[in-house]
Image (tube, rainbow, N blue to C red):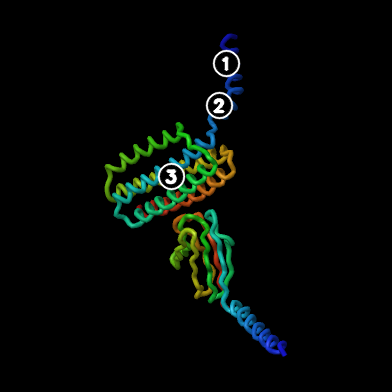
């Protein structure tokens, strides 16, 4: 009886707590701006490593496109937060992304030639997939400001393009 | 006495206007806008000799690429064009963002 009621209480608590937890997990606009900006910076850093290491023309062209596009969209993001008077706020998601990217960079640093090219491009596919998933399911639905939401939507289309571009390059490296 | 020269001038203007008006009927320039990674209109019809002008409103570089065919580079915030030489129906896409797709139907004039 005691156990059962505790379980019931726990279930009740979970049920009622769920919407609260969701509300707490929902990132704020300053956090969303920080996550999106960080994701872009990290991909530019990955591309710069590829530009130093790769000799494959398609990989180099892809990396150049990543630097160009992510820098361009991040400039738009900076202009927007300035206009909205929003200060991007560091958060657990940004930190996790940054740590994972540092690990990946260290791993890639040990590779050369085709092994590097394949690993870099495979990670680009996975990375864009991950960021696009977050944009679609969490960041875009959570964004309060309409202009921020619109920029994130353009970002999603841009990064979906990058994902397909990376998949194309990966196919050519096989 | 002043009406005569004005009238003849008017005829000249009409003739000039007709010439300007008639010229594009032979070869048109058709504009395709690129905004937020979308070609619009997505599908374009043109005749051989027409020019397609892609106007890129994005801050990103795009291309209009036909697999195994032509490619037009369209720099950010700029326009680029292509004069159509052969009839046919082609799908084109942006090589940097392959999720951007367009279609072009070119008929003989």
Q: Label 3: which residue?
A: A40
Image quadrant of residue B34?
bottom right
Counting other residues with Cα less than 10 Å from the Cα at mark 1, is it few (<14), some (14-19), or many (20 or more)?
few
Q: Dot 2 lies on which element? A: helix
Q: Label 1: which residue?
A: A7
Q: Dot 1 lies on which element? A: helix
A102 left or right of A74? Answer: left
Q: Residue furthest front?
A: B1
In this view of the protein, which residue sits in the foreground, B78 or B17? B17
**Mark 1 or mark 3, whichever is nearer to me:** 3
For residue B81, which numbered disc appears in the image? none
In which chain is the residue bearing label 3?
Answer: A
Q: CA distance from mark 2 to mark 1?
A: 19 Å
In which chain is the residue bearing label 2?
Answer: A
Q: In the image, is residue A62 above or below residue B106? A: above
In this view of the protein, which residue sits in the foreground, A10 or B52? B52
Do residues under tags 2 and 1 come within 8 Å of each other at their CB atoms? Answer: no
Residues at discs 2 and 3 both on one chain? yes
Where is residue B90? Give x, y as percent: 52, 66
Q: Residue at x 43, y 48 (%)?
A: A70
Where is residue A121? Give x, y as percent: 37, 48
Q: In the image, is residue A78 above or below residue A168? A: above
**Mark 2 or mark 3, whichever is nearer to me:** 3
**Mark 2 or mark 1, whichever is nearer to me:** 2
Q: Earlier in the sequence, mark 1 or mark 3?
A: 1
Q: Dot 3 lies on which element? A: helix
Do residues under tags 1 and 3 come within 8 Å of each other at their CB atoms? Answer: no
Q: Earlier in the sequence, mark 2 or mark 1?
A: 1
A41 left or right of B51? Answer: left
Q: Residue furthest top?
A: A2
Q: In the image, is residue A102 above or below residue B39? A: above
């Amino acid at each position: 009886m005691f156990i059962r009621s505790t379980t019931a209480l726990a279930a009740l608590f979970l049920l009622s707590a769920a919407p609260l937890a969701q509300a707490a997990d929902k990132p704020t606009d300053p956090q969303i701006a920080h996550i999106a900006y960080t994701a872009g910076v990290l991909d530019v850093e990955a591309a710069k490593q590829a530009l130093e290491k790769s000799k494959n023309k398609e990989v180099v062209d892809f990396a150049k496109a990543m630097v160009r596009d992510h820098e361009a969209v991040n400039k738009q993001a900076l202009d927007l937060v300035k206009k909205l008077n929003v200060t991007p706020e560091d958060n657990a998601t940004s930190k996790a992304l940054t740590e994972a990217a540092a690990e990946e960079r260290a791993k890639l640093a040990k590779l050369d030639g085709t092994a590097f090219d394949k690993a870099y491009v495979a990670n680009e596919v996975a990375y864009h997939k991950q960021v696009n998933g977050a944009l679609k399911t969490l960041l875009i639905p959570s964004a309060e400001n309409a202009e921020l939401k619109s920029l994130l939507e353009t970002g999603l289309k841009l990064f979906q393009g990058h994902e397909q571009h990376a998949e194309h390059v990966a196919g050519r490296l096989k | 006495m002043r009406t005569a020269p004005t009238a003849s001038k008017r005829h000249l203007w009409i003739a000039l206007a007709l010439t300007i008006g008639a010229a594009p009927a032979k070869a048109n320039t058709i504009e395709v806008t690129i905004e937020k990674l979308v070609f619009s209109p997505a599908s374009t019809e043109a005749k051989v000799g027409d020019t397609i002008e892609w106007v890129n409103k994005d801050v990103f570089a795009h291309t209009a690429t036909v697999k195994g065919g032509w490619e037009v580079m369209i720099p950010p915030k700029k326009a680029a064009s292509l004069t159509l030489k052969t009839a046919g129906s082609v799908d084109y896409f942006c090589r940097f963002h392959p999720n951007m797709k367009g279609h072009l139907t070119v008929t003989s004039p």
